[in-house]
Image: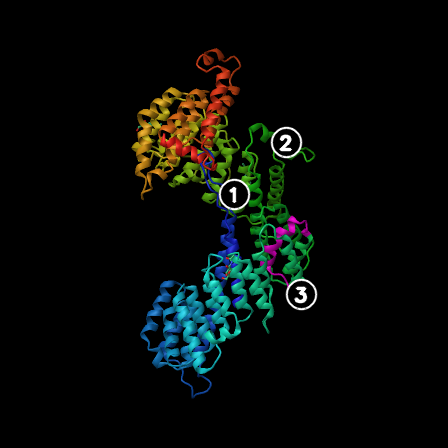
Amino acid sequence: MMLSSRSRAIICALFLFLVILEVKSFVPYKNFAVPTTSQLDAISRKGKESSRLARLRVNRDRLHRVVKSIEYYGQTEGSERRASCVLLNAMRMLLEAKTQDKISHVGNLLNKIDIVNEECRPIQERVITATSLAGLVSISTNILTNMLHSSYLPSSRAYIAACSALRQTGRLEELERLIYDLAELGTKLDTAIDVVAWNIYLSSLCSSIDSPNDPTLARIWEWMQPSVAQRLFRVTPDVTSFNILLDGAARVRNTTLVERVWHDLKGQRGVEPDIVSYNARLKASSGASSRAECFDILEEIESRNISPDAFTIDLVSNHLIRAGRYDDLQSMVDQFLTDKSERDKSKALAAFLVTLVQQENIESARNLFDRCALDEPSVSSVSPCTRHFNILLDGYSKIAQLSLSKDQLALIQKTLENPSGTFDSLDLDPIKVAALTEGRELCRMVVSFGVEQDPYTLSSMISLCISSDEIIELMNGSTAPLSPAVIRCAITYLGRLGDPSQACRVFDQFAFQSYNNRVWNVLLGALSEGAKQGNSILDIKSTISSKRHVLEGKGISSLVDGLTCADAAQTLLSAMNGMMERVEAPKPNSQSYCLVAASASQIESVDPSIAMKLFRNATSDGIPADGRFVNAVLRCFGGNLEQALKFWKEEMRMACIEHESRSRTRAIPNSRRPKKNLIAAYNGLLYVCGRAIRPDTAVRVAYAMRKEGLEPNEISLNGYKAGKRQQEKLDRHKDTNYNLGAWFKFLPKPNMIQQYESLLYIECTKYNPDNKRTSNDRRVRIIL
Ligand SMILES: *[C@@H]1O[C@H](CO)[C@@H](O)[C@H](O)[C@H]1NC(C)=O
Ligand SMILES: *[C@@H]1O[C@H](CO)[C@@H](O)[C@H](O)[C@H]1NC(C)=O
Ligand SMILES: *[C@@H]1O[C@H](CO)[C@@H](O)[C@H](O)[C@H]1NC(C)=O
């Protein structure tokens, strides 16, 4: 029982392995875009929740049995004392109690009964077990302590239940005291203590270890000597005890200790290493250079005829795949799945798929799925379920994230319709295209098999669409609930696929009444994307409608139809500020302002007054002048360099500096303050320099940063470059007869442009903080 709950815990921990992306800089669009982070963790969390529920069910069953045995105790032989009626009533109520409140209520009742004096010992023991299972820990430890102090050793079942409850509720000091009390009594009575209780204690110690040379590890290792364990705890370490220590040492990567404990384990009489022991060794050797070691261990497992468990497969799958031993992996999985119940098979396959997708082995995941779930039925076949499809679809969608122009999309669509077509002419990342193609094939399978769809399925499928019509069709045909997350996903992807009108339509149909600014910001994001992709005029009336509409007839359509994307974003912002009578909307937050600023900065002829108004409105609205926002507003000036510099000097700089000094809740030494917000603001100015193609001014801005004690860096340089790129892109879209002469008057001569750009490059790369050599330079500068 101990073992299985442990491996369950380990599998749960694996599930929780999340990928956390570190956001390093203020790069607009990337930051503002609606997060499309993997759903994998959410899918896994669902799995973890179902394991937790299963554990609860097992607990309830056991509780049921214990209460029954209290009821029947003493019924057959009349001589024994039966439980009192009050106690029996309380126990029956405990069985009925489903909520924490009700359980606590029973706890209060039990506290009023003098169990220690009124009930006989066998009944008391059962009450210890029952209250432990129900989580009424203080009652069970009370009774138990009392017993131990009067030199009565209860059955191991009772004290193991109490130990387990103490561990689960985190009362580790009490657990420790109980273990030592048990050992003391064991010595006194010259009786052995059940090793399971001790193992619970060991695993509570091991789980708190977080460094390879933690003294606890050495201490436990000493206890493993049979004579020591006998003397101190009256137990004989078993394989689980060794496994707990092995696993603890493997977790913190103390390989030497793992090897030593392994050696001890092999030498211990009557104890044989099992698969958990091997798993710990595999875990300890899971470094990059250890493939050979891993295969050695695997061979040893095979030669000893031990069956690998799910954890073994997780640990070796990456090595096997990288070594091209896919068939070996498959046969391990087959063996593992054989003879399992349908439910367990399905869960195990899902866990393997998660591991493979997380290791970016989507192809192998797909192979495994095809073999186990789609091929000819065999003993190891699994019936495919929604969760399997969700994991794979999410994996494909994560890889396939393409950012494509309209023309490219059209070409892809044509190519996908024609099976013999190729993507060669498109110059796309073949890995992404393959993921897109395979993912879409899986989507078709979901539809044609009639796989039950949930919001995760639908969201992933939407993210693999390549036209807005496809998205609408999917939503129309899906049986999945159109949850807020699905709607946000649809709006985002409609924006990315260049159909902001349809995004507005979907918003009106499904989300208009939401007072949550999250979905409103998602719509602003779609409009900003629309502004980026040519700032088309919204034509909402001509969009198609899904049959699953809910709110047709009202909404933002009438406000924004016929406007450009950038204008529509501003109108929505006004609505959010309560300036549109017919529309009720949530208040905008900092992100809303950022998105509106981002959409305004995308268009060719920017009205600088918009940037100023945005900033002033936001400031009076209490939006802090943080780096991201200030950067976005400055970009709104487009190529209006003079105005931008003026506004910066007169208004924004002060607000920024105020924010920088005000937003600290705890003091950071002045010298160490990163001043990220100010740097981001200056990077915005450099973007404007780029749009205006004024590297000379950019160099001056870089000097100004120096004077403020800031160091322009690569991101600053990229700001300038992005502005320049944007301007060049807009210029390409312009009429050919546009008057170059008027521009060139203001620009530095072409060769001067290059010279200033090299200067800017030097300014921005001079003080690379990663470069040790320059740190002396810096000190010299400050002294000067
Ligand atoms: C591993 O653990 C042992 C025993 O605690 C300790 O002596 C040794 O220094 C540890 N090794 C590392 C690399 O920390
Ligand atoms: C939505 O589905 C219905 C039938 O279920 C179909 O008649 C209608 O054409 C579909 N609409 C779209 C836009 O796909
Ligand atoms: C700023 O607020 C005024 C009124 O308070 C409003 O008329 C104007 O449209 C707003 N401008 C922007 C860009 O939000």
Q: Do the residues labelled 1 and 2 touch (CB within 8 Å)?
A: no
Q: Residue at label 1?
A: 459
* Left-right relation of 101 to 725: left
Q: Give residue 126's position: percent from left, percent from top.
A: 43, 76
Spatial distance from mark 3 to mark 2, Cα to Cα? 54 Å
Q: Mark 3 is on which residue type? A: Asn
Which residue is rendered at x = 47% and y = 82% of the image?
190
What secondary structure is the stretch in magenta mostly built from? helix
Give the label on residue 117, or none.
none
For the record, the magenta segment spans 303-326
Q: Give residue 431's position: percent from left, percent from top.
A: 62, 39
The answer to whether the beta carbon of the residue marked 3 is less than 8 Å from any atom of ligand 1 is no
Q: Is residue 312 magenta?
A: yes
Q: Can residue 621 be seen in this view?
A: no
Q: Residue at label 3?
A: 305
Q: Residue at label 2?
A: 414
Query: If you read the primary sequence from the N terminus, does the residue marked by circle 1 or circle 3 appear first?
Result: 3
Q: Mark 1 is on which residue type? A: Ser
- Secondary structure type for disc 3: loop
Residue occupying the far bottom of the picture: 79
